[in-house]
Amino acid sequence: MIETSCAYVASASNVSAPGEAARAVAVLEEARALDDRAFVRLAYRRILLREADAGGEEFYLGKIASGELSRAALLRELFWSDEARGVAPPPGAD
């Protein structure tokens, strides 16, 4: 295992970083009444700390619509993305 400067732990098994589960629950709670497009946009803002790009937004909307990904699974994919592993969690997230 390798610990990065932003306290994320990376391994071949994609181990969750401390605080990820709590952050995922918070996003799911916040998004409870949102439609899928608004959910994807919120997930990008909360996890990647940026707006969703058009390609990513459409990709994840398609995955949700087809049933290939649940909302929780989408959050896991974002948390475990190379991009997220390089983004420090917001203050107080852990």
Image (tube, grey):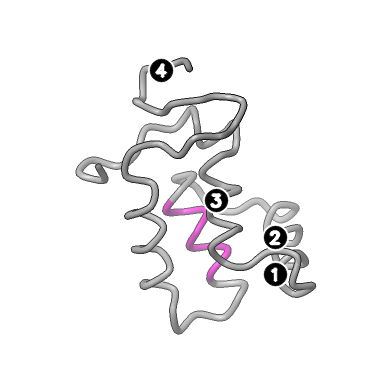
The part of the chain drawn in magenta is: 39-46
Among all residues in the image, which is located at the extreme left?
A: 92
Relative to 20, does residue 72 appear above or below in the rendering?
below
66 magenta-colored: no
Q: Secondary structure at mark 1?
A: helix
Sequence-first disc among 2 and 4: 4
Sequence-first disc among 1 and 4: 4
Does residue 92 appear to the left or right of 51 in the view shown?
left
Whether the residues at callouts 1 and 2 have beta carbons within 8 Å, the answer is: yes
Sequence-first disc among 3 and 1: 1
Q: Position of residue 87 (x, y in %)?
A: 44, 32
Whether the residues at callouts 3 and 1 have beta carbons within 8 Å, the answer is: no
- Residue at position x 50%, y 31% in the image: 85
- How packed mark 4 is, by other alpha carbons closer than 10 Å (few <14, some 14-19, many 20 or more), is few
Relative to 29, does residue 85 appear above or below in the rendering?
above
Looking at the image, is mark 1 or mark 4 nearer the viewer?
Answer: 4
Sequence-first disc among 4 and 3: 4
* Separation of marks 2 and 3 at Cα, in angstroms: 12 Å
**Which one is nearer the viewer's eye here, 93 or 37?**
93
Q: Which mark is residue 64?
A: 1
Q: Quadrant of the C terminus?
A: top left
Q: Secondary structure at mark 4?
A: strand
Tell me which amino acid carries mark 2: Tyr
Residue holding disc 4:
3
Magenta stretch prevailing secondary structure: helix
- How packed mark 2 is, by other alpha carbons closer than 10 Å (few <14, some 14-19, many 20 or more), is many
Residue holding disc 3:
76
- How packed mark 3 is, by other alpha carbons closer than 10 Å (few <14, some 14-19, many 20 or more), is some
